[in-house]
Amino acid sequence: MCAVFSNMAGLTRADMLKYHRSSCWICAVFLMLAARVVAQTDASNVLTVADANWTLILDGEWMIKFYAPWCPACQHLHTDWESLGRQSESLGISVGRVDVTQQPGLSGRFLVTTLPTIFHAKDGNFRKYVSSRTIEDIQAYVEQKKWAMVEPVPGWKSPSSLLMSGMANLFRLSVWIRQIHTYLTNTLGIPSWGSYVIFAIITLFMGLMLGLMLVLIADCIWPSRPKHRENKTVVIVKEEVSEEEVEDILTEEKHASDLDNESERVSGDESTEEEGAISDGAAAGSDQPPSEGAAESSVRKRKPQAQNTTEGT
């Protein structure tokens, strides 16, 4: 004991301060490590959802948040969402998050247009959360089953549908095109208008190739009929019809000519009779006035002649 006290007595005040500072730094480091471990343990309850594991949310009950690191509203929600992840076991749910900058396919699959966007999933049925984003309201939404009063997303718009799968591929394509544009302008030094011209030429070429493929497929499914056969058929039909029509026309013309000849012959006979009667009447009238009976007979002769003339015409 005396030796210990003698050693402590031999320490100066500067040495005591040095040891004190060293011990404070060691305690601070241990506290930081412990806090980091606790934070990692708590944050591990929030699952990072990606294209590779998104099918996990089709089973059970989930709360999924879509966010972007640059979004101020998303940053404000970060603390409450981590707190919700720590309470996920007591609530009987799973909590996930999706970074739309890293997972554009999922943002297209869920058709995310605003940030942050929260979805509730229950056995493959998805509902969009539109209430307040405070931790209390989210907990009440789950505990009181308020999600049951919300209409789920229709089947054709469901993330697992074929339409939304195509939308996911479209979003991935848009990001890929943007990355190529960035590479052309920043790395290769091509101006922006040059990049646009390149994309326009590629688009036109792909459109032409797609149109050619569609034409070939249509020809294979519905082959076109040869035209020369149709023309021969049409000519044959026209020839047969023309022969029949010619025979009918010739018969009708012959019959009409016979009728015309007969009518001319009848009209010629009638005109000769009328001229003879007029000459006889004129000779008799020079000698004496005609009697009433002769006048009546001449009238009677003219009437039948007029009737015959009309029938002949």
Image (cartoon, grey):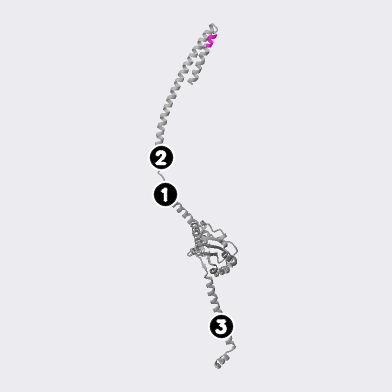
Label 1 and label 3: CA atoms lie apart by: 85 Å
Q: Earlier in the sequence, mark 2 or mark 3?
A: 3
Split into 4 quadrants, where in the image is the N terminus? bottom right
Q: Which residue is mark 2?
A: 231
Disc 1 marks a residue whose amino acid type is Ile
Q: Residues within 10 Å of mark 1 (few under 14, many from 20)?
A: few
What residue do we see at 53% from left, 11% from top?
296
- Residue 270 in the image, given as x and y percentages of width and height: 48, 16
Mark number, residue 221: 1
- Residue 178 in the image, given as x and y percentages of width and height: 51, 61
What residue do we see at 49% from left, 18% from top?
309
- Residue 49 in the image, given as x and y percentages of width and height: 51, 65
Q: Main secondary structure of the magenta part?
A: helix
Secondary structure found at label 1: helix
Badge 1 vs badge 2, beta-carbon distance below 8 Å: no
Badge 1 vs badge 3, beta-carbon distance below 8 Å: no
Q: Earlier in the sequence, mark 1 or mark 2?
A: 1
What residue do we see at 44% from left, 51% from top?
214
Residue 88: image quadrant is bottom right
Between disc 1 and disc 2, the foreground one is 1
Disc 2 marks a residue whose amino acid type is Asn
